[in-house]
Amino acid sequence: MKSHKKGIMQVTDAQIGWGMALIGIVFVGVAYGYYADDNSYSVAAQHAIRVSEAADKYVSDNFDSIVAQSSATKAFVFDITTLKNAGYLPGSFNATNSFSQTYRGMVLQPSAQKLQTLIVTTGGVSLSTGKANKIGIRIGANGGYVESGNAMGSQGSWSEPLSKYSFNPGDGHIAIAQFFKDGVSGNDFLYRKAVAGHPELNAMSTNLSLGGNDINAAKNITATGLVNTANATVKNTLTAANANVTSNLTAANASVTNNLTAANATINNLNAGTTRTSGETYTGGWFRTTGDTGWYSEKWGGGFNMTDSTYIRAYNGKSIYTSGQMKAGSLRSDGDVSVAGVIQLDKINVAGATCPVNGALSRDDKGATLSCQSGIWRSGAGKPQLSTFTLTHYGSSFNYSNVGVHDFCTSQYGNENDRDDSWRGVQLLGDGSWQIAVKDGSETVMCLDW
């Protein structure tokens, strides 16, 4: 009896273990099913959002054509193929969602220039209302589903009878409303993007007030009247007849035909008729003029300008004064030169040497004045300048040394033969220069210049 009871207990434990395992498998299966369904809803919603965005752009860009082909009772129809061919969806985009449903877009024109777009899925698997609603919720505020001949917004946010569009895909399909995204309407709203053939949609017909907010990232600002602001930052170009900035103006380029008034202005390139500043003007680059003008003193009537490529001129014949040094490569006066101090001659020349131009003045190393006469530096009146030159040569041939042009030269020893077959002396040449001649000896010559 004991072994029989023990067998019964063993069978009972096994049954319990198998039962628990089966329950776990059921729970895992149910959880996985919920996860798989939830994932498929999200994938379908993302697919629909992509189609909705492409359709929105397509309707906006093709407004004129759609208006011509639609009315309050006749819908303009497009599909995935239309969006692909027009380049709003890539060619590889799958035409059906994860439930094998494809898309149909329908656009009505309930009033002139007012478009109303509805997108529904068609074909494929007919979903339960609950599943279709879950996909609509994931699409967003414009997502919904089809039920009983109506396109219903998820959680009752909107409703549209499908009879208006003369098409009903049947219950269990997805709907996307774009009533508040119409491509173009003839209302009083200002459109953010350009609409072909409708420039009035991007134009204000009254004053624009931003309520104290900023205008950021403007490319070009063009005004025919006065631009009046506390601060202005323009990335590219500011163009205005008049601009009044009470604090700081920063712009890449500015073109002002009349008056620009600013406390501080930072502008890469400014084009203006007249620029007037009550303070100082600083520039990190060149201050350039494009004509024969330059800097002008409004008070004193003088300045600097250039009328040719050679000279910087003092305008109105004004004199130039400095308490410092005036330095130039060369200095020329077309009239007299008057010096209140001392004329200092820095260049040193040697009397008897050649000089560049007659009438030039210089000095020697002792400070005596030299003047250029007949191409030769000559000392002024008074004591003559003495120069000595020596040539030594011991050999059987004559050796010569030209000592230049001088008023008079003589041998220290006198021209002579100091021993057999030797000679020394100084000679005047035809060009006015003197030379020492020595054969097997040494000679010193003394030259005088007045």
Image (cartoon, rainbow, N blue to C red):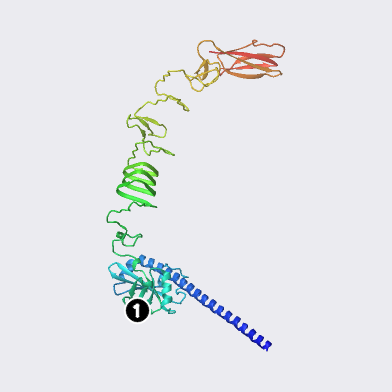
Q: Tell me where residue 25 appears, x and y as whole percent.
A: 56, 78
Quadrant of the snapshot with the N terminus: bottom right
Judging depth in this view, the residue of 409 and 180 nearest the camera is 180
Report which quarter residue 173 is drawn in: bottom left
Name the element at disc 1: loop
Q: Is residue 293 above or below residue 149?
A: above
Q: Name the residue at the right extreme.
A: 420
Q: Residue at x 51, y 10 (%)?
A: 382
Q: Is residue 417 left or right of residue 129?
A: right
Report which quarter residue 182 is drawn in: bottom left
Q: Residue at x 70, y 14 (%)?
A: 422
Q: Residue at x 29, y 71 (%)?
A: 110
Q: Is residue 423 visible?
A: yes
Report which quarter residue 428 is drawn in: top right
Judging depth in this view, the residue of 77 and 100 nearest the camera is 100
Q: Is residue 164 left or right of residue 405?
A: left
Q: Tell me where residue 240 appears, x and y as whole percent.
A: 32, 47
* Count of marks placed on residues: 1
Query: Which amino acid does the dot numbered 1 rest on?
Result: Gly
Q: Is residue 84 visible?
A: no
Mark 1: few/some/many CA within 10 Å (<14, 14-19, 20+)? some
Q: Is residue 153 left or right of residue 346?
A: left
Q: Which residue is mark 1?
A: 149
Q: Tell me where residue 98 appears, x and y as whole percent.
A: 47, 75
Q: Name the residue at the front extreme.
A: 1
Judging depth in this view, the residue of 235 and 67 nearest the camera is 235
Q: Is residue 268 above or below residue 173?
A: above
Q: Is residue 308 above or below residue 155?
A: above
Q: Tell me where residue 282 appears, x and y as whole percent.
A: 41, 37
